[in-house]
Image: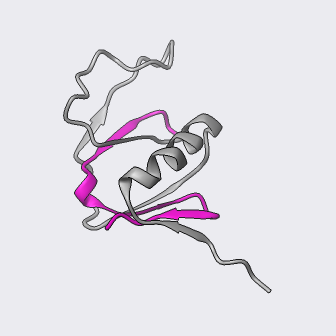
Amino acid sequence: MRRAKKTVRSWKQAQALLEQWRRDLANINVELKRPRVIDVVPIDFVSGELVERDFTNADVTVRRSSGAILVIDNYEIAAISDGKKRFEPV
């Protein structure tokens, strides 16, 4: 019998899940309502750190395997999943 995936619906409940994925450096899939990127953040390829940037308006930031960091508005996210747990904001 297959176990159902756990689905989280609110941002408040998702904070712990998102933090766990960040600590574990988990590979996640992000599904967007409309497939467009809000902003791409440059990084210093020598140190791997972000180039100075103001993230006061950033809702979700995701680092791609290439090293680029994507900035996505909350309302654009349809779902985020690591294959075991899924976050679908209401």
Quarter that holds the N terminus: bottom right
User: 21 or 15, which lies in front?
Assistant: 15
Residue in the picture at 37% in, 53% down: 11
User: On the image, which quarter does residue 84 sit in?
Assistant: bottom right
User: 37 or 57, which lies in front?
Assistant: 57
* Rendered position, 27 above or below 10: above
Residue in the picture at 25% in, 66% down: 34
User: 10 or 50, which lies in front?
Assistant: 10
Determine if residue 36 is in view: no
x then y, percent, for residue 82: 59, 58
Determine if residue 19 is in view: yes
User: 76 or 11, which lies in front?
Assistant: 11
How was the colour assigned to the protein in this rendering?
one colour
* Rendered position, 19 above or below 53: below
x then y, percent, for residue 19: 52, 40
Bounds of the magenta segment: 66-90
